[in-house]
Image: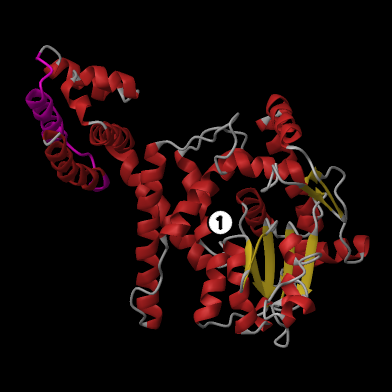
Amino acid sequence: MFRRLNANLSFVGEKLSLSSDFCASVSRMSAVHFSLEQAALRIRKAMTTISSRLINREGVIHQAFLALLTGEHLLLQSRTGTGKSLLAEQIFSCFTDARIFKVQASKEQQPDTFFGGLDTEQLKTGRIMHNTVGSLVESEFGFIDEIFDANDFTLRALLSLLNERALIRGVQYVQADTHTVIAATNYLRVNEVTEAILDRFLYKAVILPDKQPLLQYRIAQRYIEHEGKVILPAERVPLAELLQWHRIITGDYDSLTIHIPNDVVYSMNLVIRQYEYARNRALKEVQGIQNDFYVSPRTQAKALDALRAIAFMNARSEVQIHDIQALSALFATSGVEQEQEAFNKAWSGVDKSLSVSNGFDQLRVLLDYDDVLTTIRTNPSALRQPLHTLLDSLSVRRSLAEWFKDIFGNQDATIENNQRALRQFLHDFVPACDEVRELKQGLEKEVEHVLALASKE
């Protein structure tokens, strides 16, 4: 349930120690009563409540819940007076039992502002030890206002807490309870340290002032009704439930798995590559900057959690191809139209290319073929059995299994015949588009590598 389930369960103002047997019992009970549809409905209700309180913020609210479900952080950038603090507080108000840490950063602050004051007795012995009670370390949610007003020394100290969820200072190591931090800023301050901080905030949004008269009218109406205060939702979600959802989405829940098909993963990477290319081309044309935009492997890996969260929010236990388009919430800054348009064009380009002449079906067949190669690489003795038998055990595409069975099914299951069959399949395969052709070329190299290793066994 919580990140340290077998250790303790933390509530506001107190900690209740639970035995591992009791925790296991709670987990089993949750598995029995869990409803994906009910969870998705609770999320939609929470998002609707926030949207009714804060006008024209649907995009960033969606980002915030992706961050909450995946256990990531959100950075809000805007000019003063656009309601960043209210937005963060309204989001956190949807949950009960969570400890919330709030601070406004300043240049004079030291790391103890976030980690707790120093233990003076330990300091006399030369050991830097923080008393973490009431700090960000022991809070599930955090809001840092004007984060880039903090000095670089303090920001550097925050890096491990935001990424590894641990306080690491000198000889002190404390596993943090921090789940999601929302930070706000009026400006970006770019240097080596702040770039690292920006990388820790996977979700980013720029909030522009609403100047459209009707929007201004609706915002004024909300202010008259609530006087700028947070309203508590009629139905709030216990923190334990959110963390259960998080475990499902990150693959740490035995009773339910959100499945991502191979073709979705491959297509996602194609879209990311196209998006990188588009962003770098725009930078070169406008600013003369060469290849400055980069999606790190870490972010690409985190995108898989985002895909599972998107499916989860739609009450599905399997990710679908069209969910990739919703990843604009992760890769493009909300509120920046150029980035949103670049990602949507990257998605539509890949989708259109693969939709023509059954490109997606071909992609799935070749990725199944790659699964066969992976099995042989892991267990070279598999090359000695009939290939159609091996394919049946892997649950690959019917077209792939039938091809091997029809063409080579009556031949003896020798290594030589199987090698010839694997090569022949790729030789006869005619790609429908460039994306499939590129995958085939990669597999042609891979099959020779795998067969060479298998022949040595």
Numbered circles on residues, count: 1
**Which residue range is magenta in the image?**
411-435
Q: Does residue 207 appear anywhere in the picture?
A: no
Give the quadrant of the C terminus: top left
Q: Nearer the viewer, residue 175 or 414?
A: 175
Residue 242 appears in which quarter of the rendering? top right
192 is higher (above) or lower (below) than 24: below
> 9 or 283, which is in the foreground?
9
Judged left or right of residue 343, residue 154 is right
Height in image: 128 above or below 91? below
- Residues 297 and 264: in front is 297
Above or below, comparing residue 299 to residue 431 in the picture? below
Indicate the position of residue 27 as horizontal and vertical percent values: 70, 32
Q: Where's residue 407, x and y in %?
A: 12, 18
Q: Residue at x 92, y 60 (%)?
A: 225
- Check residue 421 for magenta coloring: yes
* Tag 1: amino acid: Ala
Q: Which residue, given by chain and number where applicable, does mark 1 sit on?
A: 329
Crowding at dot 1, Cα within 10 Å, few <14 / some 14-19 / many 20+, comes out as many
Does residue 350 appear left or right of residue 27 in this picture? left
Q: Which of the 4 image quarters holds residue 144? A: bottom right
The overriding secondary structure of the stretch rendered in magenta is helix
Q: Secondary structure at mark 1?
A: helix
- Residue at the image position 41 percent from the left and 58 percent from the top: 297
- In the image, what residue occupies the spot 27% across and 22% down? 391
